[in-house]
């Protein structure tokens, strides 16, 4: 029970971040970022989502077990953007999402100490 309580803040933060990324991805763009900055923003957002998801829902292969669901989420966002009329579907954005997810396992060991449950 203590383990579940210890994960609740991480889970709340993960779902808040996921909702924020969804909102930012589907609203009319207020920022006109250069192409490289946009891809960097995608990679950093998905790196952050992967690390938060790994802290909230740890598994044996932390955070690799969450990569496919987050990659599918990224594709879903891109598909929805294609239907908005003010955003566009972009495979390059999705590739940047995947790049951020690919970086997560390298950062995960540094965050694993945050995921320790109290005795």
Image: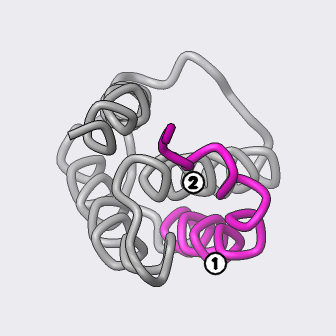
Q: Which mark is residue 51?
A: 2
> For the residue labelled by badge 1, is the local secondary structure a helix, a strand or a loop?
helix
Residue that lies at the very extreme toward the front in this rendered image: 119
Q: Residues within 10 Å of mark 2 (few under 14, many from 20)?
A: many
Q: Nearer the viewer, residue 13 or 118?
A: 118
Highlighted magenta segment, given as a residue range? 93-119
Residue at the (33%, 27%) spot, across then down: 12
Q: Which mark is residue 102?
A: 1
Q: Nearer the viewer, residue 17 or 57?
A: 57
Could you say which quadrant of the image residue 110 lies in? Answer: bottom right
Residue at the (65%, 58%) spot, across then down: 112
Q: CA distance from mark 2 to mark 1?
A: 11 Å
Kindly check if marks 2 and 1 are in contact, taking CB atoms under 8 A apart as contact.
Answer: no
Q: Nearer the viewer, residue 29 or 65?
A: 65
Q: How is the image coloured?
A: one colour
Residue at the (47%, 58%) spot, across then down: 54
Q: Is residue 43 magenta?
A: no
Residue at the (29%, 47%) spot, across then down: 81
Q: Which mark is residue 93?
A: none
Could you say which quadrant of the image residue 45 lies in? Answer: top right
């Amino acid at each position: 029970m203590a383990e579940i309580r210890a994960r609740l803040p991480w889970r709340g933060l993960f779902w808040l971040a996921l909702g924020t990324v969804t909102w930012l991805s589907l609203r009319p763009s207020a920022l006109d970022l250069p192409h490289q900055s946009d891809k960097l923003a995608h990679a950093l957002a998905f790196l952050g989502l992967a690390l938060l998801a790994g802290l909230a829902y740890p598994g044996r292969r932390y955070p690799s077990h969450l990569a496919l669901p987050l990659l599918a989420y990224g594709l879903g966002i891109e598909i929805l953007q294609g239907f908005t009329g003010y955003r566009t579907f972009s495979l390059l954005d999705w590739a940047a999402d995947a790049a951020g997810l690919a970086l997560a396992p390298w950062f995960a060991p540094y965050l694993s100490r945050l995921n320790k449950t109290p005795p």
